């Protein structure tokens, strides 16, 4: 059964050895440190409030001891003063407790939210910057699971766990000290319980780490499968893949449920042993304390205070167990998130960027370029000079490597060897923002964002005026269909441009590229969804669109190719023919064959 979702599995659960575990822990701790550092003042204030609260809480039972041992005998003797003072003091501690606890919870809540906000922003900004290669590998589902379920688990720890942890820790330390002050032998008996508790906690931490790593990984796989199915819902329904998808989902959800159940069993065992140890300690203290009261070496008031303290002593242990649980879960989440934040873009922004000449001329050079996507070599050796202002068409069979060449010019990837240069500057040295301005690629996907048509066109040149937007749309022949939309240029295209046809979307993204006015324009099947009249209209416009800029055109319909200054025929990543289209047709080589085949297909 596991084979079924191997395609989904991207992280291996069983390969985490001790060294890796340590590395993960360091990475998580570094991230946590960087998140908490800006909050240091708030955290100090919160700890101060907690200390004040503990003082108030600790004073309570002490006042009761004094009331029983001194106040009541004095009152029986006719002096009510001490008893009244004790009662008043108790009331004051109660009030102080309420006030400090409220201030603490508000403060810690705000700190928790600030930390999460910071982290959420960091993850989103970081993921947006990572290169295409990362997104092809990591899948959006895993990113979503980092941003949702992993962050949720962190939120739960910050919201509930951390408060409980600090409150419990302080009260345990405070009460422990108080017990020793009240009576040393009895205090030691109560504290002896910590030895088995320490061992128990260590056992729990080891086991839970493994279990929670598993839950984080499985929930990520569930989300990946979900996102994948929803993204491909048309294909899923068209090919009736629902039952198979459902069974994959059942399998993944089952694994997640199993991992979660195991985590719960672990907590159950941990909590029950914890309580047992606590109860045994209380029994022992009562036994010993009772005997000593009978002997007369301990007052009744002190024993009463002891029992009151003890109840408060072991209650927080439950809280600590809860914290240990949410900590283990969020530590696993933090490992995943810090891993994502540690990803470096495969095509990073240069440390010392070189400026492109102004204005960019647009000369593109491939110098001994070799490229692979990590597997087999796609471009074995590519040397190519595209002079500024030239229009070059790339043709060749499906899978020949045309889009790969285009992606290298747009620097969506870096070559494995050799360099790609724009106006003599290695693309690796060009600042990302400069490169995006100089090189624009239009593909057949033509992604539109929810928003108006005008906004989508203006994406290429934020701040462009309405008349510039309309001029760009006119130039590519998009104006005609836009003006008959219900709200014209202000019509909302809906999510992913669902309101428009595929060809209309292409025209919009074509206008967008034109408005961006890049020095190098890449059209990768940019007109493939257009009908013949629209494509002819675009072609007529191409002469103006391409004037004064370098262009790389990839098209299967050769009509577009014929306007190029030069055609490169690519086969298995190698240029097998290179020259002006008319000459290549006369040469009767591979391009002529393609051209004849295309011509017959038209007639
Ligand atoms: N992201 C990727 N990861 C791995 N291999 C890839 C990736 N993209 C493309 N390839 C491989 O690289 C080769 C060239 O692909 P490319 O997209 O450049 O072809 P193409 O000439 O544009 O084809 P088409 O005409 O079908 O668009 C193909 O064999 C393809 O399988
Ligand atoms: Mg392609």
Image: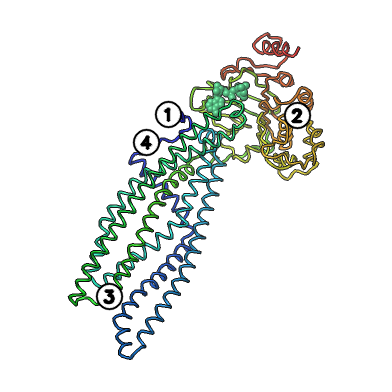
Could you tell me how far apart the alpha carbons at marks 3 and 2 are, in whole angstroms? 96 Å
Q: Earlier in the sequence, mark 4 or mark 2?
A: 4
Horizontally, is 129 left or right of 497 in the view? left
| The N terminus - image quarter | top left
Query: Residue 462 appears in which quarter of the rendering?
Result: top right
Badge number at residue 547 = 2
Name the quadrant where ligand 1 sits.
top right
Q: Count residues near mark 4 (Cα–Cα under 10 Å), then give few for <14, some for 14-19, many for 20+.
A: few
* Residue under pointer 1: 1
Q: Earlier in the sequence, mark 3 or mark 4?
A: 4
- Disc 1 packing (10 Å; few <14; some 14–19; many ≥20): few
Give me the C-alpha separation between circle 3 and circle 1.
64 Å
Residue 96: where, in percent of width, then height? 44, 74
Colour scheme in the image?
A: rainbow
Please give the label number shown on residue 436: none
Callout 1: CB less than 8 Å from ligand 1 = no
Q: Upstream in the sequence, badge 4 or badge 1?
A: 1
Mark 4 and mark 1 in contact? Answer it, CB < 8 Å. no
In the rendered image, which residue does mark 3 sit on? 302
Give the label, 3 or 2, closer to the camera: 3
Q: Is residue 346 above or below residue 97?
A: above
Q: Quadrant of residue 484?
A: top right
Q: Give the quarter of the image for residue 392.
A: top right
């Amino acid at each position: 059964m596991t084979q079924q979702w191997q395609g989904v599995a991207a992280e291996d659960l069983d390969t985490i050895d001790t060294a890796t575990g340590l590395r993960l822990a360091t990475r998580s701790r570094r991230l946590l440190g960087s998140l908490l550092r800006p909050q240091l003042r708030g955290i100090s204030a919160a700890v101060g409030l907690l200390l004040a609260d503990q003082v108030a809480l600790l004073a309570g039972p002490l006042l009761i001891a004094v009331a029983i041992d001194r106040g009541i005998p004095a009152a029986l003797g006719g002096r009510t003063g001490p008893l009244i003072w004790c009662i008043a003091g108790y009331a004051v501690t109660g009030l102080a407790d309420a006030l400090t606890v409220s201030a603490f919870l508000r403060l810690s809540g705000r700190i928790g939210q600030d930390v999460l906000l910071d982290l959420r922003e960091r993850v989103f900004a970081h993921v947006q910057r990572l290169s295409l290669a990362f997104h092809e590998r990591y899948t959006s589902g895993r990113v979503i699971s980092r941003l949702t379920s992993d962050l949720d688990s962190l939120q739960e720890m910050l919201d509930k766990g951390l408060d409980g942890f600090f409150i419990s820790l302080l009260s345990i330390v405070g009460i422990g000290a108080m017990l020793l002050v009240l009576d040393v032998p009895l205090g030691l008996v109560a504290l002896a319980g910590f030895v088995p508790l320490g061992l128990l906690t260590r056992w729990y931490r080891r086991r839970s780490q493994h279990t929670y790593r598993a839950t984080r990984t499985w929930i990520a796989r569930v989300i990946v499968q979900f996102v994948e199915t929803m993204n491909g819902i048309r294909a899923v329904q068209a090919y009736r893949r629902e039952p198979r998808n459902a069974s994959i989902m059942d399998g993944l959800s089952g694994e997640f449920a199993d991992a979660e159940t195991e985590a719960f069993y672990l907590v159950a065992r941990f909590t029950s042993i914890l309580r047992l140890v606590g109860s045994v300690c209380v029994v022992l203290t009562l036994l010993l304390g009772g005997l000593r009261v009978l002997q007369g070496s301990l007052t009744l008031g002190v024993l009463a205070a002891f029992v009151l303290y003890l109840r408060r002593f072991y209650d927080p242990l439950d809280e600590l167990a809860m914290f240990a649980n949410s900590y283990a879960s969020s530590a696993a989440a933090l490992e995943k998130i810090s891993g994502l934040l540690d990803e470096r873009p495969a095509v990073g922004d240069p440390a010392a960027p070189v400026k492109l000449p102004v204005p960019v001329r647009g000369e593109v050079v491939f110098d001994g370029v070799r490229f692979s996507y990590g597997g087999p070599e796609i471009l074995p050796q590519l040397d190519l000079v595209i002079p500024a202002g030239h229009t070059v068409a790339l043709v060749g069979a499906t899978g020949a490597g045309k889009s790969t060449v285009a992606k290298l010019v747009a620097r969506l990837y870096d070559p494995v060897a050799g360099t790609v240069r724009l106006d003599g500057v290695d693309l690796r040295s060009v600042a990302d923002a400069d490169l995006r301005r100089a090189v624009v690629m239009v593909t057949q996907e033509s992604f539109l964002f929810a928003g108006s048509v005008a906004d989508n066109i203006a994406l290429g040149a934020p701040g462009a005026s309405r008349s510039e937007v309309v001029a760009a749309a006119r130039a590519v022949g998009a104006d005609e269909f836009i003006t008959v939309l219900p709200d014209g240029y202000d019509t909302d295209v809906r999510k992913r441009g669902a309101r428009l046809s595929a060809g209309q979307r292409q025209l919009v993204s074509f206008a967008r590229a034109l408005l961006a006015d890049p020095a190098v324009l890449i059209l990768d099947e940019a007109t493939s969804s257009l009908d013949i009249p629209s494509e002819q209209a675009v072609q007529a416009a191409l002469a103006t669109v391409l004037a004064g800029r370098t262009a790389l055109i990839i098209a299967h319909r050769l009509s577009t190719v014929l306007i190029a200054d030069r055609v490169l025929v690519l086969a298995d990543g190698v240029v097998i023919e290179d020259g002006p289209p008319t000459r290549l047709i006369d040469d009767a080589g591979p391009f002529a064959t393609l051209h004849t085949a295309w011509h017959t297909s038209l007639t």
